[in-house]
Amino acid sequence: MSKTIGRNPQITMLGYTRVGKTSLLAAMHRWFEDTVEKSDLQLSPDYATVSILSDQLSRLEGLFEHIKVTEDKGIAPSQRQHTYNFGLGKRGEEPAFNLHFQDYPGEYLKESPETRERVADLVRSSVVVLITIDAAALMEENGIWHTSINQPLVISALFQEAYLRLEGPRLVLFTPVKCETYVHDEARAEELKRRLKEKYQSLLALFASERLRNDVAVVITPVETLGEIVFSHVSHMRPEESPPLFFFRKIGPDSVYRPRNGDQPLRYILRFLLSRAYAERREGFGPLNPVWRSLRDLFGMDQHLREAVESFARGNKADREFEIVQGEELLTIDS
């Protein structure tokens, strides 16, 4: 069998323009780079991916040159669909398979029926969808900017279309970013989860429907994409003056860019993939997405890789600001 499987897991980064999708990927990559010596795994972006993420990391690090930090606007919005490729394998060896993170111009969600259908196709074909949420827009002033910035109504309609005829299990990650202020203590972390469930009530109800509840795992997994900052203020208080500008401040004069929990989405993704590969090997799913079959064969033949992925995947968090909302059975690692 070839070292690189023919079909690789596709993951869609879902969110409106400038909500923080690229910053999230940068935080995930930065975390893995900083802690690679603690893992038997290696996450290797291809040249195009590392070029974009290096640019974004430089911008994020530059934010901390000032006491006050203006809301990170990241790199210029993409004008086309882009795939971020990460090879995953044992440290020091060639990647065994690739994770494809699909991004798209955020305006596609509202631009035209054709562009929305393009995003729906991505969501439909992806085994994992990662919903990136601007935490300040969700939390401040009772979330008056949430609808305009995070576009929950559009995203709910997108899933209703994309999951109409779902083929095989799926994982949906709700990932608040720039959430440092809201995970500072247990009470705030609980409020973040409560507010998220309230504002995404219709979408969560869709996932919990009789048609989908056995096939869709749902997880809340916030990522502190900046690190040593807290929310300061917003530029104006009238939501009709869109978009607002959020400001943050460093927690100390020596604060630096230090994202936290960037590993958690990846841990959940690998836990889901490994769980589904094991389940398919035990039971079979009938007409199967080639991704599952390829991963089943790969994990079945390469014991050391399987053990490394399993060890990493078991490090996910499920307390405080993290929660498996539904589908824990789809995340059970049982070979």
Image (tube, rainbow, N blue to C red):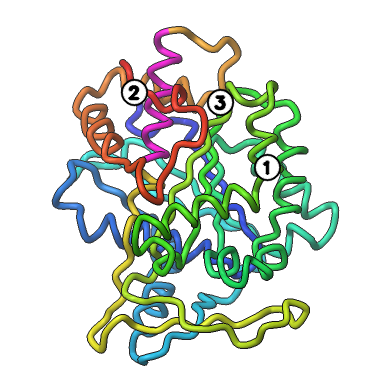
The answer to the question of whether label 1 and label 2 lie on touching residues, with beta carbons closer than 8 A, is: no
Q: Which residue is mark 3?
A: 169
Name the element at disc 1: helix
> x, y percentage for residue 227?
33, 70
First in sequence: mark 3 vs mark 1: 3
Q: CA distance from mark 3 to mark 1?
A: 17 Å
Name the element at disc 2: loop
Depicted 293 relative to depicted 324: above or below: above
Could you tell whether 163 is left or right of 185 in the image?
Answer: right
Residue drawn where x is 31% and y is 18% of the image: 300
- Give the mark count: 3
Amino acid bearing label 1: Leu
Decide whether residue 143 is among the magenta residues.
Answer: no
Judge depth for marks 3 and 1 and give the one in front. Answer: 1
Is residue 102 visible in this depiction of the protein? no
- The tag on residue 313 is none
> x, y percentage for residue 193?
50, 51
> x, y percentage for residue 109?
74, 57
Principal SS element in the magenta part? helix
Amino acid bearing label 3: Pro
Q: Which residue is mark 2?
A: 333
Residue drawn where x is 25% and y is 47% of the image: 42
First in sequence: mark 2 vs mark 3: 3
Residue drawn where x is 20% and y is 55% of the image: 35
The answer to the question of whether label 2 and label 3 lie on touching residues, with beta carbons closer than 8 A, is: no
Could you tell whether 194 is left or right of 256 in the image?
Answer: right
Amino acid bearing label 2: Ile
Local packing at callout 1 (Cα closer than 10 Å; few below 14, some 14-19, many 20+) is: some
**Residue 182 or 177: which is nearer the viewer?**
182
Q: Name, please, the residue furthest toward the right.
A: 113
Q: Which residues are magenta?
A: 268-282
